Image: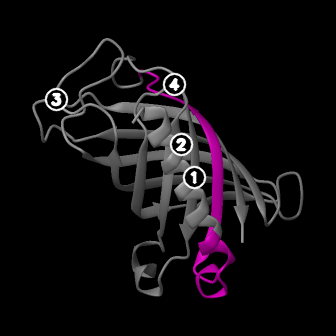
Amino acid sequence: MHRAHVAARWGAVGLLLASLLAASPAVAGWIDEGKVGILAHDVGIFGDNLESGFDVDGELIFKSPGFLKIIGSPRQDVGISINTDNKTSFVYLDILNWRPTLCRHLLRPDDAIYVTGFLGGAVHDGNLNHDTSDKKALGSRVLYHLGAGVGYQINPVNSIEAYFVHLSNAGASSHNGGINDIGIRLGFKF
């Protein structure tokens, strides 16, 4: 099956599951925020640029469980990033996603500037042990997923953020091409 069809099916299944989860009253109480965005794929920050295209990114962020308050109440998230040019796509789960607010009430009574930092894992559909002319060898199917962002909370419901993500196996394999994406995402609080 062509990789674009696989990515499209992944995306359709992910969006369907996210919609069902968000619509379920039992689960909706767990979900704090949803984000969608567009990212430049494999931009070459901290490495070489080989893969092309853009990634369409979607993410659900869950409320932090009370027992994590001692480490700053990080939230957990699940997401999908689909490449538009038939390059590496991935699904991810971050177990630590912090979002401290830097300042409030800049332009409006309910706005804010925040930063975000996250760490988790991803499963991708890219190459493992051989580079091609347009795809990196990533070394292992499961990779670290980490990054940061800076955002503007427009009002209590809507936000916009600049977002950077890095995928890599951290040298655990002889191949560690790594992919870095950067872009913009919109956030919607539930």
Closest to the observer, 178 or 131 = 131
Quadrant where the C terminus sits is: bottom right
Crowding around mark 4 (Cα neighbors within 10 Å: few <14, some 14 to 19, many 20+) is: some
Q: Amino acid at mark 4?
A: Asp
The Cα–Cα distance between marks 4 and 1, rounded to whole angstroms, is 17 Å
User: Residue 31 placed where, x, y %?
Assistant: 60, 74
Kindly state the secondary structure of the residue where label 3 is placed.
loop
Q: Is residue 31 magenta?
A: yes
Report which residue position mark 3 lands on: 129
Closest to the observer, 7 or 111 = 7
Check the image and name the residue furthest to the front.
1
Q: What is the span of residues highlighted in magenta in the rendered image?
A: 20-44
Kindly state the secondary structure of the residue where label 1 is placed.
helix
* Up/down of 45 relative to 27, above or below: above
Q: Give the residue at x 62% y 72%.
A: 20
Q: Is residue 62 magenta?
A: no
Report which residue position mark 1 lands on: 12
Q: Which is nearer the N-term, disc 1 or disc 3?
A: 1
The Cα–Cα distance between marks 3 and 2, rounded to whole angstroms, is 24 Å
| Mark 3 in CB contact with mark 4 (< 8 angstroms) | no
Q: Which is nearer the N-term, disc 3 or disc 2?
A: 2
